[in-house]
Image: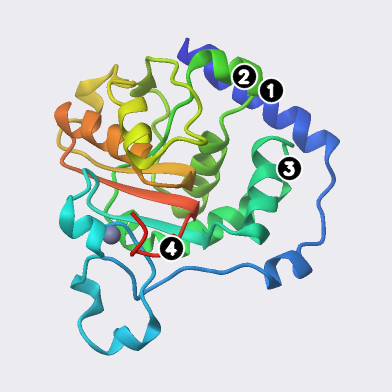
Amino acid sequence: MAWLQSRLVEMGRLVVDTVLPPTDDTDIFDTLTFLDDPCCASCGYPFDHQMSGISAFDLQCARCLARRPAYATARAALQYDAASRKLVLAFKHGGHTDRLHTFAAQMHRAGRTALAHADYIMPVPLHRTRLMKRRFNQSALLARALSTRCGVPMDAHSLLRAKRTPSQGGLSAKGRYRNVQGAFIVQNPEQIIGKRLVLIDDVMTTGATLGACARTLKRAGAARVDAICLARVVKPLATP
Ligand SMILES: [Zn+2]
């Protein structure tokens, strides 16, 4: 199945790379909000720049203080807003992979600390029926591009999505958490025991999917799990 999965990814890449020409992104990239420090030390929630004078590297947001995430750190290259949504949806559903190198460069910037000590980059897996339908796993494409760029090898086979979960769209934070519980399994524990892993996903909303993956990997013996996403939702912290 792993072989079939990688073949499908390859085929998807070939089809979309051939069909879609590169586009001029200058105007689009001018409208994006790029994320960086200062931010929550755990989940990467962006803090006001006025806080950067104090030891912002150790600060956590209210959500992470209330419940410590299963991953050590999560970082995202972009804020998920009207501008980045267009890019992400064109990539995810329209197969526009011509921006992969730019995405990988930005994810490398945002996740440089975790990548500096990582053993493997690991895409958040799709269930095989969803992979067949969509033709490619957008997280695996991002992971591969990032792996090529930073030199950390990719492991796209050890973590599997065993349960086909309904889409997270429209679910509350609690609903999202419940939806992905028990959804993932590790099929090659010997590959990840004692290793430092970096999960890759396209969009982080509440972090429920990344949390479920990180818990599964740590239970299987991973020493540390970090996460890097292309974009993340930034809701005001006062809103539950
Ligand atoms: Zn946080």
1 vs 3, front mark: 3
- SS class of the residue under badge 1? helix
- Circle 3 residues within 10 Å: few <14, some 14–19, many ≥20: many
Say if residue 238 shows up in the picture. yes
Q: Say what amino acid the circle numbered 3 marks.
A: His
Say if residue 180 shows up in the picture. no
Callout 4 touching callout 3 (CB < 8 Å) = no
Using residue 2 as the reference point, say whether residue 96 is left or right of it.
Answer: right
Q: Against 148, is 39 above or below?
A: below
3 vs 2, front mark: 3
- Who is closer to the viewer here, 186 or 61? 61
2 vs 4, front mark: 4
Which residue position is annotated with label 4?
110
Sequence-first disc among 4 and 3: 3
What mark, if any, has residue 11 been given in the picture? Answer: 1
Distance from Cα at disc 1 to Cα at disc 3: 14 Å
Q: Percent from the top left, x then y, of residue 105?
A: 55, 60
Sequence-first disc among 2 and 4: 2
What mark, if any, has residue 96 been given in the picture? Answer: 3
Callout 1 touching callout 2 (CB < 8 Å) = yes
Ligand 1 under 8 Å from disc 1 Cβ? no
- Who is closer to the viewer here, 78 or 102? 78
Q: Residue furthest front?
A: 239
Distance from Cα at disc 1 to Cα at disc 2: 5 Å
Residue at image location 25% in from the left, 26% down from the top: 191
- SS class of the residue under badge 3? loop
Residue at image location 34% in from the left, 62% down from the top: 44
Sequence-first disc among 1 and 3: 1
